[in-house]
Image (spheres, rainbow, N blue to C red):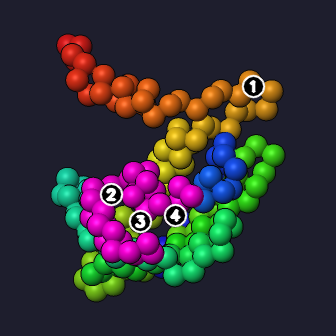
């Protein structure tokens, strides 16, 4: 069973980060590979996730559900697909700099795709966790290094504008 633990600090108090994590639509904007989300209720969603295996795209439909929670400190969720089950444990702890998010992921591949699922998770888990952390830190503001002046988080309108400019700006040859 491939497992991975990650931890990083976000420049937000635990209640603000918790509110974001519990909003599945918002949360999925930071999860790499999620292309579609269908909310079934406040604790369950179907996700379409795309991941490349070499040059071949693998598309999974996952059912993600929150199994237990202790707001704003802990959450346990599972995500299941035809050939995998993922257990996810998230905990938030207030720090002097904001909130430390700790995540633990335990993936179990099954059936004929087990070797592919296991290798893919081992290969990409660290990279995807870093992308998730980066997204949260951009959203809430990264924790500044010791002695550095704190910066205000970039507003959503400015992020949208920058994204549109980057998407439609002429490319240099």
Q: Do the residues bearing badges 4 and 3 touch, measured as CB atoms within 8 Å?
A: no
Q: CA distance from mark 3 to mark 2?
A: 15 Å
Task: Please determine whether, in this image, residue 171 is positioned above or below residue 13.
Answer: above
Mark 1 and mark 4: Cα distance apart in space: 31 Å
For disc 1, the marked residue is: 148
**65 or 54, nearer to the observer:** 65
Magenta includes 53?
Answer: no
The residue wearing badge 4 is 22
**Number of the front mark, 2 or 4:** 4
- Look at the numbered discs 1 and 4 and tell me whether their residues touch, using CB distance below 8 Å: no
Q: CA distance from mark 1 to mark 2?
A: 34 Å
The first of marks 1 and 2 along the sequence is 2
* Residue 43 drawn in magenta: yes
Pointer 2: residues within 10 angstroms few (<14), some, or many (20+)?
Answer: some
Q: Is residue 11 left or right of residue 135?
A: right
Please indicate whether residue 18 sits to the left or right of residue 35 in the image.
Answer: right
Q: Nearer the viewer, mark 1 or mark 3?
A: 1
**Residue farthest to the bottom?**
111
Separation of residues labelled 4 and 3 (CA atoms): 24 Å
What's the residue at 26%, 28% (across, down)?
167
Question: Residue 18 lies in what quarter of the image?
Answer: bottom right
Residues under numbered marks 2 and 4 in contact, where contact means CB atoms less than 8 Å apart: no
- Sooner in the amino-acid sequence: mark 3 or mark 2: 2
What are the residue bounds of the magenta stretch?
19-48
Q: Earlier in the sequence, mark 2 or mark 4?
A: 4
**Numbered disc in front, either 4 or 3:** 4
């Amino acid at each position: 069973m491939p497992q991975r633990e990650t931890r990083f600090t976000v420049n937000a108090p635990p209640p603000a980060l918790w509110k974001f994590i519990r909003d599945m639509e918002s949360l999925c904007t930071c999860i790499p590979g999620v292309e579609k989300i269908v909310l079934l209720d406040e604790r369950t969603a179907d996700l379409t996730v795309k991941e490349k295996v070499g040059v071949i795209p693998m598309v999974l439909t996952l059912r993600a559900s929150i199994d237990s929670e202790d707001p704003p400190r802990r959450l346990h969720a599972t995500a299941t697909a035809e050939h995998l089950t993922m257990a996810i444990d998230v905990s938030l702890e207030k720090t002097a700099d904001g909130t430390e998010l700790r995540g633990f992921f335990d993936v179990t591949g099954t059936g004929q795709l087990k070797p592919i699922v296991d290798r893919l998770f081992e290969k990409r888990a660290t990279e995807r966790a870093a992308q998730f952390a980066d997204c949260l830190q951009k959203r809430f503001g990264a924790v500044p290094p010791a002695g550095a002046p704190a910066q205000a988080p970039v507003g959503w309108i400015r992020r949208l504008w920058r994204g549109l400019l980057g998407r439609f700006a002429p490319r240099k040859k």
